[in-house]
Amino acid sequence: MTAEATLDAFRRTVIDMLAGADRANQLPDFAGAAAAEMLEHNTRKVALDPLLDALGWSFRDRTEEARVVGDTTLFIDYLGIDRETRVAELIFEAKAWNASWIVGKGSYAARPPTEVLAAAISHLNGGAPKTCPVTKEWIERIEQVRDYVVGVHAKGGAIVQRAVIGCARWIIILRDPGKAFIDKTITAEDVIALQMQQMVDRSDDIYTLLSTEALKVAPRGPIHADEIALHLPDPTDIRRLFRAVHVNRNRTTDPYQPQPSIYANAWLIVQRRDGALLTIRSRAAPETIPTNPKFFAEHLDEMQERSDTMLAHMRTAYDAPVPDPSPIGTFPNFATTTGSSPVRRDATGSNYLVATGTAAHYLRPAPNLACDFHSHEACRLIGLQDEEQAVNARSFDRRSFFMTGEPHHCAHRHIKIAKQGVPCPIDVFEAKLCCRACTLQDWCWSAEKLKRAPCGGPPAIAAPANP
């Protein structure tokens, strides 16, 4: 439930916005000029920016003039996004102060605006009525919003939760743009249409429909698999499911523990129909990644069992089927400072969530191709070692849990360069992992590019017995 104080504050914002916009609209551009109604740019600055700020869509949570590139390039006035995943959640098409209100034509001339807009969308989708029930100006506005919704879905996979057309004097809200423009079904109940004082009277509705508090309903913290139905009651809202592994990497002061000590645990990631991501973690305690190869397969089997158990708990929570985990290539990626990645790092720099698709771990039991370049010495003999000094002990500072000569270690210079170019998502905590031993290999390497990798052909030389 939204706090009454928050709703009261937003109501005052709407009142102040309307009054301020009315005053600004009566001012001439400069002394001696005739007063002229505000154009779209000024309407946005005077009225719509403050309105979106009050709804929680700060400059960090919205993109202005967002580009959707298709046959033509579309520019969305305001696109509300999730700050972490960059998933689109809100489209707001701004209009100038004097933009016309929606009115019906013909048999729709006396109909309520919600019915008129629903009929116009149905007409645009190829349904009834056959004769356009609105002006050409309004059908073009609706078509523009439709293209935004469909374009964002085509490019990013997300279906925005709300779409809005508005100026300082009126606002029209589509409760479910995906239903309207992708499923192509709409009724008057799916539309909110408000003018001036109605915006004040129904400010609570505006807030509960459009605020970040309302739309960002995905829990920020992880949940447990048997709690999924509490947060996502309808299993048909699950668009995709991905396995993941949570990694904690720390420098330890225990002389009997490796540096770094890496703890891992099985997680799942659910992508909702609107594109938002929910994270699900195991109830079991994390376990350290073993350094002894004798126990490595046992560790991977344990992560697989935990992942399977969470998936079984999810399926028990619903009467309807839950989708199987999807490949990592379909993961929408987390937003990072350098672009997007299947790996998300928290503010401490010690915790990482690694989306792994259908695999339960980012590590394979062993590389999927025999290669000599796990050894620094083997690379040095052909002048292609990645660094002058071999990693002879597990290193926190060099981000190398695996040592030279171990099957999961890579010491080849060309692989190091390739990882900088992609960039490698694992590199943030494990810089020298062999790509062939990583389940994210297909995310980084195309099949053609992999053929040109140093390990793409048969081994060049025999690895030394004691590197």
Image: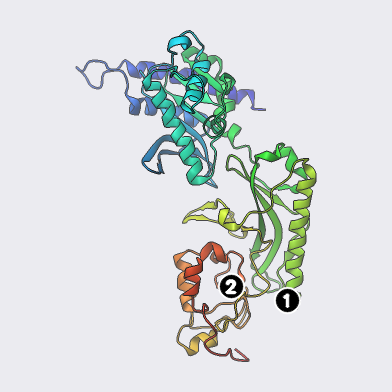
Of circles 2 and 1, the one toward us is 2
Residue 442 position, x and y percent, is: 55, 64
Looking at the rendered structure, the kind of residue marked 2 is Arg
Amino acid type indicated by mark 1: Tyr
Q: Compared with residue 312, is residue 177 higher up or lower down, i.e. above or below?
A: above
Can you say whether 297 is above or below 24 in the image? below
- Is 286 on the left-hand or right-hand side of 202? right
Residue at the (48%, 45%) spot, across then down? 155
Give the farthest residue toward the front. Answer: 130
Q: How many C-alpha atoms fall within 10 Å of the one at disc 2: few (<14), some, or many (≥20)? A: many
**Within 10 Å of the Cα at label 1, are there few (<14), some (14-19), or many (20+) other Cα atoms?**
few
Can residue 425 be seen at all in this image of the molecule? no
C-alpha distance separating marks 2 and 1:
30 Å
Does any portion of residue 377 appear in the rendered image? yes
Residue 351, numbered circle: none
- Report x, y in % for residue 12: 52, 19
User: In the rendered image, which residue does mark 1 sit on?
Assistant: 256
Say what secondary structure mark 1 lies in: loop
Earlier residue among tags 2 and 1: 1
Where does residue 415 sit, x and y in percent of width and height?
49, 74
Dot 2 lies on which element? Answer: helix
Quadrant containing the N terminus is top right
- Residue 413 vs residue 34, the one in the foreground: 413
Q: Is residue 135 left or right of residue 30?
A: right
Give me the residue at 72% from left, 46% from top.
322
Q: Residue at x 68, y 72 (%)?
A: 365
Q: Decide if residue 26 is on the left or right side of residue 352.
A: left
Mark 2 — residue?
Answer: 436
Question: Most extreme residue toward the left, as rendered?
Answer: 32
- Residue 286 position in % (x across, y down): 74, 61
